[in-house]
Amino acid sequence: QPRATLIIVGVVMSKSENHLKKPRSIAFTRQNGYCYYCSQPMWTNNPLKFALKYNATLSQVKRFQCTGEHLVAHQDGGSSAPHNIVAVVNIAINKDIKKNRSTPEQHKKLIQHRMSLGRWHSYRPNSNAQYA
């Protein structure tokens, strides 16, 4: 007789990411659950609830998982203190920041400009967000 299997989508954090858990949570609350870069809503621990709320697939909502980003990178003397951490969605993290050495504010403007032109990503849970 076949058995039903429940698969729970979870988040596995490496030891190095654990130090951001509390500052990321503080940033998420400070930002009212919206990404610092793209102003889209994020989820922290319940992708299914987020998917149901925004009528999306689990595949679509993966990119809206909240993660922490240093405003000033460790290599540049930044810390993991709450004032240096912002909450961002996975899709908004871009290696171009580190590669091109652009500032977080420059990256934010670039993302918002691309979104205003419809050239960022196709699924947007918050279609009412205003972009530069």
Image (cartoon, grey):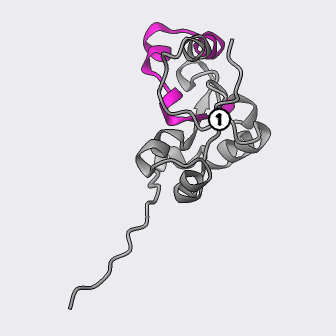
**Main secondary structure along the magenta-highlighted residues:** helix
Q: Amino acid at mark 1?
A: Asn
**From what the image shows, is residue 14 above or below residue 105?**
below
Viewport quadrant of the C terminus:
top right
The stretch drawn in magenta includes residue 96: yes
The quarter of the image holding the N terminus is: bottom left
Residue 10, x across and y down, in percent: 46, 59
Among the 4 quarters of the image, the one containing residue 85: top right
Residue with the mark numbered 1: 126
Residue nearest the observer in this picture, 77 or 23: 23
Quadrant in which residue 33 is drawn = top right
- Residue 118: horizontal and vertical position, in percent? 52, 16
Above or below 35: residue 56:
below
Q: x, y percentage for residue 62?
A: 46, 45
Structural crowding at the residue carrying mark 1, measured as other residues with C-alpha within 10 Å and reported as few (<14), some (14–19) or many (≥20): few
Magenta includes 11? no
* Front residue of 34 and 95: 34
Side of 1 relative to 118 (left or right):
left
